[in-house]
């Protein structure tokens, strides 16, 4: 059994990005610049955005953080997005989710120029992924595909079961895994799926993305399966200073010995997310997905 080391792969990916940025600077070109819009003071969002800004510094990107209070109006936010869409200095930007209830996330995402949508949430990018065209792939699914690739995990003809059908994880995962060249046969499960246990037990590759701590037990996993645990739920803990710890969707201790490969939580899928976002921003800077602006 091999434990997939997301921290190590993420560090490697960031180092590859840093080297490319150095070369861009040496050529006298503009280095990538990522902007983030953060609304309110949610603890989780603050942490994620701070980590993204720090990661930008580490790889030599420029970064801009635009902050708004919780009571910002939708039109103020739309104006800000319009400015970022038009700003030639900014290669890509993200709006940290979730947003306050009075703001439509759908409207906000749709207002981002798809050419700068490095989170890959805009319907144009989602549609391009479905069509197998070059696109900004959202960070978590991109990170998982990268882990499979770098650990040289065979996907062709394998039965992959994805549990969870959210727009940001489960559904794009099912699409990427079924693409030509990856060639899995995919079953996408959700809360209405019947016989979930049996379906999971038939999987060569099992992706758990439902957000229910330790939901997947040993009896749901086939001997020799590859298990990718996306779940990150904060559960109270007296063992840590923060008073909580992160739990995955897989009962790691009883499942791990049955697997050929497994991602731990923390340290598996999670660390790949920011590296993937940086990678998309580099692609935006290099006009690798969409042609350069006139
Ligand atoms: P989500 O939007 O809440 O979606 C959960 C999905 O799981 C839904 O499709 C739901 O089905 C399905 N589900 C819930 N209970 C189920 C059950 N008992 N059996 C089968 N399916 C069930 O969650 P998400 O945003 O995709 O996130 C999933 C987990 O991944 C969370 O723990 C989240 O924190 C984590 N996450 C981690 C990262 C990372 O970087 N590591 C990134 C993103 C998310 P229905 O559609 O029928 O409701």
Image (spheres, rainbow, N blue to C red):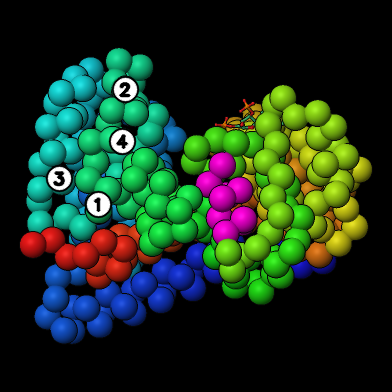
Please check the rendered image and state whether residue 176 is part of the magenta-colored stretch, yes or no: yes
Please provide the residue range marked out in magenta.
171-179
The quadrant in which the N terminus is found is bottom right
Quadrant position of residue 151 = bottom right
* Residue with the mark numbered 2: 104
Say above or below: 60 vs 68.
below
Is the Cβ of the residue at disc 4 closer than 8 Å to that at disc 1? no
The answer, for residue 245, to whether it is visible in the render is no
Residue 139, labelled with which disc?
none
Q: Which comes sooner in the sequence, label 2 or label 1?
A: 2
Say above or below: 294 vs 126.
below
Q: CA distance from mark 1 to mark 3?
A: 9 Å
Is the Cβ of the residue at disc 3 closer than 8 Å to that at disc 2? no
Residue 109, labelled with which disc?
4
Q: Nearer the viewer, residue 234 or 77?
A: 77
Q: CA distance from mark 3 to mark 2?
A: 19 Å
154 with respect to 51 (left or right): right
Secondary element under disc 3, as helix, strand or loop, is helix
* Residue with the mark numbered 3: 84
Secondary element under disc 2, as helix, strand or loop, is loop
Question: What predominant SS class does the magenta segment belong to?
Answer: helix
Q: Which comes sooner in the sequence, label 4 or label 1?
A: 4
Residue 156 rendering spot, x and y as whole percentages:
70, 67
Q: CA distance from mark 4 to mark 3?
A: 13 Å
Q: Which comes sooner in the sequence, label 3 or label 2?
A: 3
* Residue with the mark numbered 1: 116
Secondary element under disc 4, as helix, strand or loop, is helix
The answer, for residue 100, to whether it is visible in the render is yes
Residue 264 rendering spot, x and y as whole percentages:
69, 54
Is the Cβ of the residue at disc 1 closer than 8 Å to that at disc 3? yes
For ligand 1, give the image quadrant: top right
């Amino acid at each position: 059994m091999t434990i997939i080391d997301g921290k190590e792969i993420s560090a490697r990916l960031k180092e590859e990005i840093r080297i490319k940025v150095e070369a861009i600077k040496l050529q006298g070109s503009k280095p990538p610049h990522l902007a983030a819009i953060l609304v309110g003071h949610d603890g989780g969002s603050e942490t994620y955005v701070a980590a993204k800004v720090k990661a930008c510094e580490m790889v030599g990107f420029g970064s801009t953080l635009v902050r708004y209070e919780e009571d910002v109006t939708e039109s103020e936010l739309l104006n800000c997005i319009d400015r970022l869409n038009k700003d030639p200095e900014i290669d890509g930007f993200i709006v940290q989710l979730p947003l306050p209830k009075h703001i439509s996330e759908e409207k906000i995402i749709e207002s981002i120029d798809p050419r700068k949508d490095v989170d890959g949430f805009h319907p144009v990018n989602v549609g391009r992924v479905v069509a197998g065209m070059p696109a900004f792939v959202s960070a978590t699914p991109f990170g998982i595909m990268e882990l499979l690739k770098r650990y040289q995990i065979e996907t062709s003809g394998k039965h992959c079961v994805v549990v969870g059908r959210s727009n940001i994880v489960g559904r794009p995962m099912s699409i990427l895994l079924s693409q030509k060249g990856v060639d899995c046969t995919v079953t996408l499960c959700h809360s209405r799926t019947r016989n979930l246990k049996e379906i999971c037990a038939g999987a060569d590759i099992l992706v758990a993305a439902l957000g229910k701590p330790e939901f997947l037990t040993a009896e749901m996993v086939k001997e020799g399966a590859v298990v990718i645990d996306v779940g990150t739920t904060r559960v109270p803990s007296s063992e840590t200073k923060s008073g909580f710890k992160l739990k995955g969707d897989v009962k790691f201790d009883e499942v791990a010995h049955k697997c050929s490969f497994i991602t731990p939580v923390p340290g598996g899928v999670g660390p790949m997310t920011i590296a993937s976002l940086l990678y998309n921003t580099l692609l935006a800077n290099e006009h690798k997905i969409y042609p350069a602006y006139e």
